Amino acid sequence: DGGITQSPKYLFRKEGQNVTLSCEQNLNHDAMYWYRQDPGQGLRLIYYSQIVNDFQKGDIAEGYSVSREKKESFPLTVTSAQKNPTAFYLCASSIPPGQGNDEQFFGPGTRLTVL
Amino acid sequence: GQNIDQPTEMTATEGAIVQINCTYQTSGFNGLFWYQQHAGEAPTFLSYNVLDGLEEKGRFSSFLSRSKGYSYLLLKELQMKDSASYLCAVMDSNYQLIWGAGTKLIIKP
């Protein structure tokens, strides 16, 4: 079945440690996204990538980094520079935006807790 | 700035009809999306509107008025499994999705 996988579902880290969240899709989508979701707020875009080897900062990129070496994979690293990293992280993919009903398909999410 | 407004929480009765409103102010408009999100899970796509009018899909319908910056999601014959958050999102002129904070819908028997 086609879809998006994120692992792990729950992640605990100590303050000051970097942590990498994985995201893999087999939908053959060119575009991939990382969002952060906090209680009472809308999804906020961290980074997005419209093609392999290219990515752009979203609204809240500070303290995060990404890579897009393969079409299927878009890992997110939460660095120690991120001041408030505890959140629910969602990865999504889509056809290139602007081609009509370019809905985004979401992975199950990773809940990161920094202790 | 860009802004999406929707009610924080709504309550409805099983079998009834509920309308969730969404108003938006964005830099350009390239479509409006509604997603459903159960607690702790991923959002799932419900509907897409780019032209004015009503789009019907089974028990769910979505309406758009671009001149008023307004949309609503209409849920009919409510079932307990419809208890979830409903997210409104607008695609702006840069083809970025701007998200509302979501409306938590509580269904009572």
Image (tube, rainbow, N blue to C red):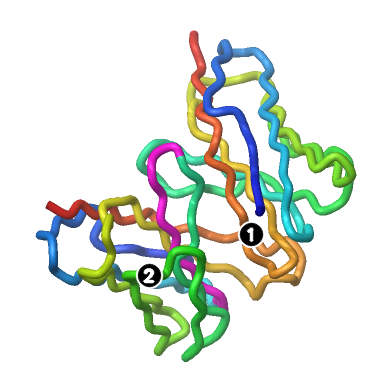
Q: Amino acid at mark 2?
A: Glu
Percent position (x, y) of residue B7? 60, 28
Disc 1 from disc 2: Cα separation: 26 Å
Q: Where are the magenta residues, as a range?
A: A29-40
Indicate the secondary structure of the residue bearing disc 2.
loop
Percent position (x, y) of residue A28? 54, 77
Which of the pair A59/B79 is nearer the observer?
A59
Q: Amino acid at mark 1?
A: Glu
Dots 1 and 2 on the same chain: yes
Q: Chain of mark 1?
A: A
The residue depicted at 31 percent of the width and 51 percent of the height is A87
Query: Is B28 drawn above or below residue A111 in the view shown?
Result: below
The residue depicted at 50 percent of the width and 73 percent of the height is A48
The residue beneath circle 2 is A62
The residue beneath circle 1 is A103
- Based on the picture, tell me whether residue B78 belongs to the magenta stretch: no
Count of marks placed on residues: 2
Query: Is A30 drawn above or below residue A97 in the view shown?
Result: below
